[in-house]
Image (cartoon, rainbow, N blue to C red):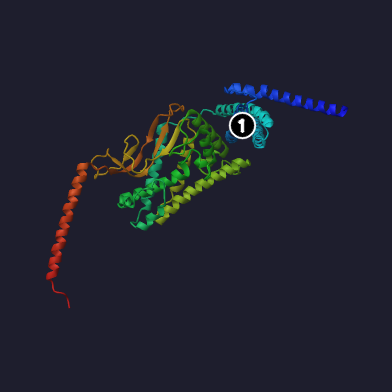
Amino acid sequence: MKNIQGERDGLQNKKKRAQDRNSFVVEAALRPYSDLKGMRFKPDNDESLSRVLLSMFCDAKEANDLRIEVHGLRTELAMSSRKEASQDLQQARLEIKGLREVVHVLQEKNQEMGEVQDKRQRTQNNAGEITILREEIQRLQKDALAKVDKVRPIPDAQFAGEFHAMIAMIRSLSRSAYDSDDADAFSAFGDGVLLRDVPAHRWKTRAQKKSSIEAWMWSALIELVFATPSKFSSDQSDPVHQVWCGLFDARGHCPWPAPSIQSETWRCSTMKQVVELAGRSIITLGQYVSPQVSTNSRARELQETILRSRAELANTVESLLIAMAPTADTSQIQELVDKAFTLAMEMSLQRPRLQVVYPEIGADFDKTQMHAIPDRSIDDMQNGTVAFVVNPGLVKWGDAEGHNLDCRYDIIPSLVQLEPILLPETEKRMSDEAVVVKNEQDLIRVELEDHTGDIPACS
């Protein structure tokens, strides 16, 4: 009997402890959480309990998204490290590593949730950890943005001069390469961004063929140097641009984030660190400052990537020019590469956004954003659509301090060939003229057939 009584007492104690734990979880976690969320909660009601637990579980799943944000911030801090702040950055790396471990633990906990009691305990912890992670992310973002030093603003006139110099150089190269009317030579162009959707008959005349060579070289520059602010310093994956878009949500046809003070400050700060890590001479001249290669593995890898990008651009342009004309003057290609990489670097370091842009084929002519090639066949140069683009334009959003980023200013408009828009009366006149010509041709053909019938056949 004593044994039975002892077991009964033990069971009663276990039951009481279980009830106490359950009451503690309800009062310390579930009820405060439901009050915070404005949810009606009844501990004895299964439906009410399930609703609160489901909400807690959803909050816990947010930890996975926060893990991705923390990883992006880790990359951001790694790219924005400076010599004078090495200790702070090292501490930030340690903090990010700790946050990643916390997120990993949270993810494992979410996968292991099985029993209701375990869910109650874990979701309480997750809610607190999510709050901590959000606070850490905000702090890291502020730290990264606070490390932006003032960059010397470059006047629009200087950018215009550098861009005009590239236009003149490309035009000179295209003239030296054009020495043939062979249509097969122009098939070497491939699918450049400025040549897509342009019908072949647009390149019939000598002037149009010269323009097509310019358009092809500009296509190569856009794809290999100016596609993104960081393209000149990266390989095809362009990781800096991916992080930028991931942080500031790039959408739409243009794969760039909408310009904002936060996005442009991050871009300016990050590219400043990239330039400092690689060295300006590597970017602008393809040369090391000293004979020795950097001992920093990250710097060395970045320098090698930039040198490969410079070589790819030079080889691409040279191979096309030689294919067009074996005697083409290629001596200016290296200078063109230097100018392109220098311009791309300076654009990436400015507070306002600078971008190489071009209109789509078929777009309506806009005199504020485009210049049209003079064409005597078009009476009204203001009414037309873009037939093809000879060279892109240079656009700036915002002022020198990086404010008013919704304001667009075209430093250099795009140069385009227009297709005239035919008015209804013009279309009718051309249609009537075509009918008259066809009738005259039919009449001539009938007369020739009649005369041919009178001629005896040859034996």
Q: Nearer the viewer, residue 239 or 107?
A: 107
Left of 19 or right of it: where is 227?
left
Residue on which disc 1 sits: 57
Q: Nearer the viewer, residue 235 or 276?
A: 235
Q: Quadrant of residue 394?
A: top left
> What amino acid is found at the position of numbered circle 1 in the picture?
Phe
Q: Quadrant of the C terminus?
A: bottom left
Tally of numbered tags: 1
Q: Quadrant of the N terminus?
A: top right
Q: Quadrant of residue 145?
A: top right
Left of 66 or right of it: where is 248?
left
Q: Position of residue 125 (x, y in %)?
A: 66, 28
Task: Please give the name of the residue rendered at 55% of the width and 38% of the height, measured from the top-left corner.
Answer: 279
Count residues near mark 1 (Cα–Cα under 10 Å), then give few for <14, some for 14-19, many for 20+. many
Q: Nearer the viewer, residue 343 or 76?
A: 76
Q: Position of residue 418 (x, y in %)?
A: 30, 43
Left of 292 or right of it: where is 169?
left
Residue 300 visible in the snapshot: yes
Taking the view exactly as shown, the residue that stands out farthest to the bottom is 459
The residue tagged with tag 1: helix, strand or loop? helix
Residue 133 visible in the snapshot: no
- In this view, 417 is above or below 122: below
Q: Nearer the viewer, residue 435 or 74?
A: 435
Q: Position of residue 103 (x, y in %)?
A: 64, 34
Q: Position of residue 68 (x, y in %)?
A: 58, 36
Taking the view exactly as shown, the residue that stands out farthest to the front is 1
Q: Quadrant of residue 221?
A: top left
